[in-house]
Amino acid sequence: MSLNDQIIRQRDFSSGEIDPDAIRRDDVEVLKYAVRYARNVSTTHTGALIRRPGRTFLFEEDGIIMDFKPFDDVAYRIVFIDGGVRIRTQAGALVASLTAPWGAADLDSLVFEAMDNEIFVAWSGRTKVITIAEGTLAWSIDDYQFKTGIDNSVRVPFYRFPSTADITMLPSGVSGNITVTFSAPVLGPAHVGAIFRYAGRQFRITGYTSPTVATATVIEQLPPTFAITVGSSAGFSVGQTVETDTTNVKGEIISVVGNVVTIVARDKLTAPTTGEKLISQSAASAISAVSVAGTPGATVQWDEQFASEYRGWPRSISKDRQRLIMSNFPQFKSAIAWSATGDNRDFLIGADPDDAMLEYITEECQVFHVVGGYDEFAVTDRGVFYIPISVGTPLQPGSVEFRPIFSSEIANIRPIQVTEGLIFVDKSRTGIYAVSATGQTARPYISNEVNRLHRHLFDDVKSIAVSSGTSVFPSRQIYAVNDDGSVVVGQFNPDRDYIGWLRWEGDGVVKSITGNYGTVICMSVYTFDGVEVGVAEMLDYDRLCDCAQTFSTASFANFLELNDGSPLTLQDGSNLSLAGIVTGFYAGKTVELFAGGFFFGEVEIPVDGIISGYDSYGEITIGVGFNWVVHPLFTNFEGGQVAGQGEHKRKIEHMLATVRQTQEFAIGNRYFGSYRGGEDMSLPVPKRDDTYRYRETGRSYDPVVPITSTFPGTFKLIELATRITL
């Protein structure tokens, strides 16, 4: 062996395709398991390199998809489309079609969360709820409604917006239909239907008169205004909060005249009594007389419904620990609202452990999404915060804390929760980051970029998804959908601390991906003769093409007739029959055709959708083809000397490609795995377990040898042994 020989034995390709600017970084271990360039291939849990799976046609639709399993053994595919929602079975049969207010431009920004038999949908408009009824399995879609208590009070979150801090509210009465007057502009026409509170008691706006005046209906009788005579009014002043020491009546002082202190009571309808004391932070005096004012007083002790048509609704929604979580509010960008435990309609803020909460991050940021896990994570435009949750600090009022773990700009793309932590996309929409646990108390989480050497594969990422391991493909994968419709697939590698990435392309432009219940579903758009068609497809490792469907060759058969309807017969008396295959969706389209293990190339399906000539096969498969290619990376070595390898042009002395279950493919300009002498060519090309030897002519500083597809067939590369010499 020459001292200048370099021997590379690569049996693990799990690092994926490396950025061209990094192909000389053989000081980085990840390059040892990488390729220079690849399209439409995938790695397995063993490190082998395979042709990517094809995709099975499920149904025709253009939209964004999610999987939904409301009951045991009952699962659906929910497709959000322009102006509505389509519900289908897992096989694709249409179950229901619902109308919704969003348009095509809103689909990418929809955020949906399943909870029991409901799907909560957040977007730029009012939150919607898609429901399937137990028993009848009837579907409906309605506006999200807060719960109404047995006392008719509405369980909404209330908030006093800073812009209204010094404005007073004056109701005309304490019950029935009233007029409400503010001391400065507060109201808008969209306030109709919203709930306000006067001193802690609710009423609903029924009519808009002006920015300062509205009509309303009282829900909870409003607290009275009391004129309280005290021994001495010294120390009492307007605006103070006072309380009586026996009846515990609390209120705001709205006037002090002589020894009469007038207060608007808060929350309670009980009245002060003579003999007890009126106490403020600066005074205390015995009460000698109490009377109820004829009309309510104006007070600053009021608040309004936090989420409403006027203020806005959440643009993100999630769930964790039996609570529904709302975030990305236009009216308060750093706020997060949690429902009461076990009740996703109850957002009335309280102090008990199971009560709803409204908290906010004090940093200048917009909360995009909240994701659950061992703790909770708030993903904002300025970074990621985690919310510690434990036995000692449960998720309850008074215990919410936001601790920063990543500080940089982040894109508003819904992150995904994985076993290791959290995955999200940075502002450039090319960087993928993972938050993972460290096991340390002082620093329990750390954030790392997981595609640093693969960024060139990503281009304006629109969404990310993750799949579960299955019996066919046991490794989990991450899918990043690029704006151009390509998909970058990340492979978890349990043997090493990184994710390898490879890019998938094809004629189908992928719009979204979901991976649940053991399947991965793509919503894609194909162009046939200038016409765009949206379809749902399922990743299928048994398919050799995309948008694929299998048909029985016995799907259509008939006989030719004479004018009187009698059959036209042959000399032997048998009917002259006509057989064909009804292809439905593929009518008038140019597609690839497979039958009996053979590839018949591209065929043009007639406009009636019926093709014939394949009745000798039991079934045929029709779909849209794609090619794959791999360029190995020759930078690492095992054994031998590398003297001069970086200073001279190099030659590939030979390559040994070990494959399993592989049909024909090419290395450079040579074909391998095709028919051998004496083999029966009436049968498909065999799937071989073999090793093939290839020799490259010429020299180069960085040899490039393409391994490519020759026709749609199976391919699995388990080892590539290369000897490179000067």
Image (cartoon, rainbow, N blue to C red):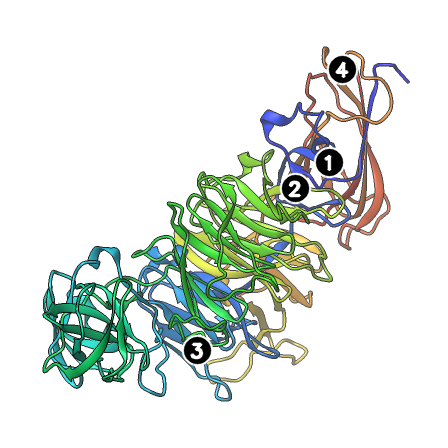
Q: Which mark is residue 500?
A: 2
**Residue 624 falls left or right of residue 169:** right
Quadrant in which residue 40 is drawn? top right
Mark-to-mark CA distance, 2 and 3: 39 Å
Mark 2 or mark 3: whose residue is earlier in sequence: 3
The answer, for residue 571, to whether it is visible in the render is yes
Mark 4 or mark 2: whose residue is earlier in sequence: 2
**Residue 325 falls left or right of residue 627:** left
Q: Nearer the viewer, mark 4 or mark 3?
A: 3
Mark-to-mark CA distance, 4 and 2: 27 Å
> Residue 362 in the image: x percent, y percent?
40, 49
The structure residue drawn at horizontal position 66% and vertical position 23%, both measured from the top left corner, is: 24
- Secondary structure under the numbered disc 2 in the rendered image: strand
> Which quarter shows the C terminus?
top right
Where does label 3 land, which residue?
131
> Residue 323 in the image: x percent, y percent?
49, 69
Q: Amino acid at mark 4?
A: Gln
Q: Amino acid at mark 1?
A: Tyr
Toward the viewer: 63 or 464? 464
Labelled pair 1, 2 in contact (Cβ < 8 Å): yes
> Which quarter shows the N terminus?
top right
The answer, for residue 484, to whether it is visible in the render is no
- Secondary structure under the numbered disc 4 in the rendered image: loop
Q: Nearer the viewer, mark 1 or mark 3?
A: 3
- Secondary structure under the numbered disc 3 in the rendered image: strand
Labelled pair 4, 1 in contact (Cβ < 8 Å): no
Where does label 4 land, which residue?
645
